[in-house]
Amino acid sequence: MAAVELEGLARHYGEREALWGVSLSLQRGQTLVVLGPNGAGKTTLLRILAALLRPHAGEVRVLDRRLPEESWQVRGEVGLLAHEPMLYRSLTAEENLRFHARLHGVQEQRVAELLAELSLSERAHEPLRTLSRGMVQRVAIARTVLHEPELLLLDEPYANLDPGALDLVDPLIGPGSGRTRVMCSHDPAGALREADVVLGLREGRVAVQGTPAEVSAEELEDLYR
């Protein structure tokens, strides 16, 4: 059963086409990696799938919900890790996670478990502004998976993470998490390792699409030239 279905998706900002004619199907449990230079439409695609932006044309279904008509249902079933961490810098890591736990009706015990799993317990009571960028990224990842979403929408999820932190977050957002993932990346080689489906965008249009067996690293690298 498909987790994401797009048919002729289009979105514009004034006269600029951010996305045009994007069609794909992603099955539950699979990973879609989206590549392309800055301004290609990757973040716009994630925000549409998260029900934060309305499509201007085409059909969009996420977890059997039609967007934008069933946006309110989709928002509780996806976890969005955006380029910005979507956290309050004046609050502590624990306070940020407790705030989001209340929004989703999640038990506070889950907050303590995630802080421990991501080796953040010792710094959990310090304001976010005092933490390193890598630690803030770990807190943002904890927020993303706090409510056990079925679909993860990940914008450069491994940014600012050292090898030790990568090992910590992999069970939560990596290939072994068991969740359906849509991940934006600038790493063609990594995309071919992690993806079940690869989508390459250039100026909002599909330039490359297929499985890793059908797509070459050279095609993906050409997106950035």
Image (tube, rainbow, N blue to C red):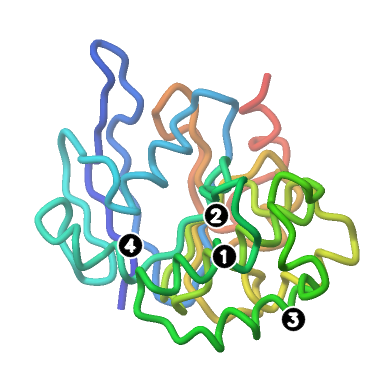
Which residue, given by chain and number where applicable, does mark 1 sit on? 95
Query: Residue at coordinates 46% horizontally, 38% vertically from top-left?
Result: 43
Residue 104 point in image, percent of width and height: 36, 73
In the structure shown, which secondary structural element does the residue marked by tag 4 occupy?
Answer: strand
In the structure shown, which secondary structural element does the residue marked by tag 3 occupy?
Answer: helix
Does the CB distance between marks 2 and 4 fall below 8 Å? no
Amino acid tagged 1: Glu
Q: Earlier in the sequence, mark 3 or mark 2?
A: 3
Query: Residue at coordinates 20% horizontally, 68% vertically from top-left?
Result: 73
Q: Earlier in the sequence, mark 4 or mark 1?
A: 4
Distance, label 3 to label 2, CA atoms, is 22 Å
Residue 115 point in image, percent of width and height: 69, 76
Q: Earlier in the sequence, mark 3 or mark 4?
A: 4
Q: Nearer the viewer, mark 3 or mark 2?
A: 3
Q: Nearer the viewer, mark 3 or mark 4?
A: 3
Distance, label 2 to label 4, CA atoms, is 14 Å
Query: Residue at coordinates 65% horizontally, 53% vertically from top-left?
Result: 157
Q: Earlier in the sequence, mark 2 or mark 1?
A: 1
Does the CB distance between marks 3 and 2 fall below 8 Å? no
Amino acid tagged 3: Ala
The image quadrant where one finds the C terminus is: top right
Q: Nearer the viewer, residue 29 or 147?
A: 147
Which residue, given by chain and number where applicable, does mark 4 sit on? 4
| Quarter of the figure with residue 139 | bottom right
Which residue, given by chain and number where applicable, does mark 2 sit on? 154
Q: Nearer the viewer, mark 3 or mark 1?
A: 1
Question: In this rendering, would 87 be left or right of 161?
Answer: left
Which residue, given by chain and number where applicable, does mark 3 sit on? 116
